[in-house]
Image: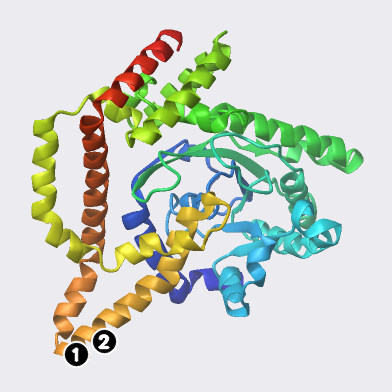
């Protein structure tokens, strides 16, 4: 794709559609901090970030910036071999293949030189490029080691402009309120840019050491901004962080405020001399709560029969309207994740990509044809399609309320198990 194509009406229309669906149905609230630190439009810079939630990571960065600004991104090379038409689409929207040693081997790395040349061309044309130096996504709130590929590409772009223009690397980090459900909150934090021009001479004499030092500096800055719970005992620690035993869970905090509170909670836990005992007890608590069908916030809130029965009546009254709102959102929500066999971090990426490119356009066409040809209700069909966004939000609210009510019922119907859980929670609370 020629860089001039990024200003075409087809590209802008496609990006507007992709962004509209993403912002309306995938994101509930979006927060961006440090936006003033980004270099001005037209300057040469890379955006580097931690990588946790597959395709949602670059999408959330792109959609945090003005629609007029074109952002390129590197993506795993294997997705470019799915289908020739899909490959052309990926190049067209600005994605480039990144070949990784751990997946494509040493031979695959040779193919990166073509991508490096394209990256250099786009960087020097004033189009930022998103890179994830972990060379793969993690499985949660922690940071893997970085490869030097990002810094290598940046110096390659500097060499392409004759070492005359500065290339910058901007460390950023993102944070999600939830990885696996739709309508979640998203935070993107932007750090101070790193200018590479002061390193040009040293790089030409000692390239490897310069790249290692800059890469470590980037990683340190990103780790300082993000929530890093570490790989060890991650699921148990994250469960504890999200439980009511973390005071922040029961407060009405914005995502940036919650991030700071969670960072403090994890820091205190890591310094706690009884950390391993707490982790062992939390593992048992998690098992008890899952067997009972409750989560820890439900136990802490102690729901009563009056409030629970009231919600049951409300949900029953709204059940017909919920049934109407499920078309086609229920299929778009439940079908794509069924294609995932191992890596659950692809959950929302599959939901969004398959739905926005295939399911929503297909179901819109089916709705028009069935209601229009079958019943002659062309205008009614069009109005219904236009109402899909608010109906989708309503469908998700109802589903969330249904889950909360179910947990409240489990709490009320299993008092003996709840007593065991509360006793166990009290012991953990004394140690946290």
Task: Work out which residue is located at the far right of the displayed protein and give it.
Answer: 205
| Rendered-image quadrant of the N terminus | bottom right
> On residue 37, which mark appears?
none
Q: Nearer the viewer, residue 410 or 58?
A: 410
Q: Nearer the viewer, residue 196 or 293?
A: 293
Residue 133 percent location from the top left of the image: 68, 44
> Is residue 349 depicted above or below 93 in this figure?
above
**Circle 1 crowding by C-alpha within 10 Å: few under 14, some 14–19, many from 20:** few
Residue 161 is left or right of residue 80, and the answer is right
Residue bearing mark 1 = 374
Residue 363 percent location from the top left of the image: 32, 76
Residue contact between numbered discs 2 and 1, judged by CB atoms under 8 Å: yes
> Is residue 393 depicted above or below 185 in this figure?
below
**Circle 2 crowding by C-alpha within 10 Å: few under 14, some 14–19, many from 20:** some
Residue 285 percent location from the top left of the image: 43, 24
Residue located at (62% from left, 35% from top)? 143
């Amino acid at each position: 794709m020629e860089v001039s194509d990024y200003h075409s009406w087809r590209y802008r229309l496609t990006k507007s559609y992709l962004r509209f669906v993403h912002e309306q149905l995938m994101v509930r609230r979006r927060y961006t901090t440090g936006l003033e630190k980004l270099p001005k439009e037209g300057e040469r810079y890379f955006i580097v970030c931690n990588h946790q939630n597959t395709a949602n990571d670059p999408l959330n960065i792109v959609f945090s910036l003005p629609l007029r600004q074109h952002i390129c991104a590197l993506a795993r090379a294997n997705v470019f071999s799915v289908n020739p038409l899909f490959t052309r689409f990926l190049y067209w929207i600005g994605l480039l293949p990144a070949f990784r040693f751990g997946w494509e081997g040493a031979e695959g790395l040779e193919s990166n030189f073509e991508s490096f040349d394209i990256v250099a061309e786009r960087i020097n044309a004033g189009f930022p490029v998103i890179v994830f130096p972990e060379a793969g996504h993690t499985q949660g709130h922690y940071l893997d080691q970085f490869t030097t590929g990002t810094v290598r590409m940046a110096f390659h772009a500097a060499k392409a402009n004759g070492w005359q223009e500065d290339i910058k690397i901007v460390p950023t980090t993102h944070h999600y309120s939830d990885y696996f459900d739709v309508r979640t909150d998203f935070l993107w934090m932007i750090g101070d840019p790193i200018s590479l021009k002061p390193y040009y001479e040293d790089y030409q004499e000692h390239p490897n050491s310069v790249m290692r030092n800059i890469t470590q500096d980037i990683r340190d800055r990103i780790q300082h901004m993000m929530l890093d719970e570490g790989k060890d005992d991650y699921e148990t620690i994250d469960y504890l962080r999200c439980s009511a035993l973390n005071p922040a869970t029961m407060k009405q905090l914005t995502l940036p405020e919650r991030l700071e509170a969670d960072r403090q909670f994890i820091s205190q836990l890591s310094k706690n001399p009884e950390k391993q005992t707490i982790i062992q007890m939390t593992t048992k608590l998690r098992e008890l709560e899952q067997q009972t069908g409750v989560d820890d916030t439900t136990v802490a809130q102690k729901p009563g029969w009056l409030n629970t029965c009231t919600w049951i009546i409300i949900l029953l009254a709204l059940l017909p309207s919920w049934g109407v709102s499920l078309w086609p959102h229920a299929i778009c929500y439940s079908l794509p994740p069924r294609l995932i066999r191992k890596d659950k971090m692809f959950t929302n990426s599959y939901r969004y990509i398959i739905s926005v490119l295939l399911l929503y356009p297909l179901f819109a066409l089916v709705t028009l044809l069935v209601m229009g040809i079958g019943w002659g209700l062309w205008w009614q069909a069009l109005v219904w399609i236009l109402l899909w966004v608010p109906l989708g939000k309503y469908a998700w609210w109802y589903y969330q309320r249904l889950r909360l009510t179910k947990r409240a019922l489990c709490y009320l119907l299993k008092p003996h198990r709840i007593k065991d859980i509360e006793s166990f929670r009290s012991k953990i609370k004394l140690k946290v």
